[in-house]
Image (cartoon, helix red, strand yellow):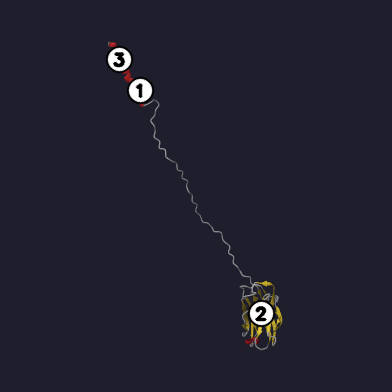
Amino acid sequence: MKKISLFYCCLVLFCILFVAFGCKQKSNPAGATDPTSTNTPFYTKTITPTVTITGTTTPTPTATTTNTPNITIYSFESGLDGWSKNSLGMGVTTVAYNTDTAYTHSGSAGSLRADSSFYSPYNLGWVSLTLSHAVNMTGKTISAWIYVPSSLAAVSSTYTAFIEIYGSNSYQTGTSYSLNTSGWVQLQYTPSGAGEDAVTKVVIVVLRTLPDDWSGSYYLDDISW
């Protein structure tokens, strides 16, 4: 009887130890380690730095075009440059090349001399240039210098000078200038109207308006447009 009790006591003790050992194994299984907390971000942002380069830019120079009008000048430096007397102006008898600097304008080497004899019915003196091709005179001012001798100035209340232009089917007459002062007088005319875009002849005219006869020479120089 005593042996049976001892057996049961040992059995109970074994069960208690078995249960206790099993609980310990369950709560701390072999090979298990304490987990380590790791903070993992929700996303990864890559930041790319922006590099700004500063400096001074040298501008490229821009060419400036200046429109320079074409200017034709007849200064009679070595001859008559194509100018001649015209049969419609019989007051001028001959034209010649002059080298006497007393009768040249602005110190040029020469001028055109127009030998003249004005008496009825020769009231017009023409010196003209026929152009090699039609010239557009739109917006241009024609200028000519005429030297008035004192003998002409003495009767010049009846003498005037002006510029005329001719086209294929038309002509224009410029402003009249009185020749009442001896020395150089400038004539000017800006064409306006029919034929100005196709001028074929330029004429310098001296006109006698009253019956005062005169014979002598006048001079032309620096004709331009």
Q: Which residue is mark 3?
A: 8
Q: Reading the chain from its start, which is encountered first: label 2 or label 3?
A: 3
**In the current view of this chain or complex, which residue is farthest to the left?**
2
Crowd rating for badge 3 (residues with CA inside 10 Å; few <14, some 14–19, many 20+): few
User: In the figure, 103 relative to 62: above or below?
Assistant: below
Label 3, label 1: how far apart the Cα atoms are: 21 Å
**Mark linked to residue 22:** 1
Q: Residue type at mark 2: give it.
A: Ile
Label 2, label 1: how far apart the Cα atoms are: 141 Å
Mark count: 3
CB contact under 8 Å: marks 3 and 1: no
Element marked by disc 1:
helix
Q: Residue type at mark 3: give it.
A: Tyr
Viewer-side residue, 149 vs 133:
133
Q: Residue 168, how many percent across, how many down?
A: 68, 75
**Mark linked to residue 204:** 2
Element marked by disc 3:
helix
Q: Residue 221, how many percent across, how many down?
A: 66, 78
Q: Nearer the viewer, mark 2 or mark 3?
A: 3
Quadrant of the rendered image containing residue 140: bottom right
Q: Quadrant of the C terminus?
A: bottom right
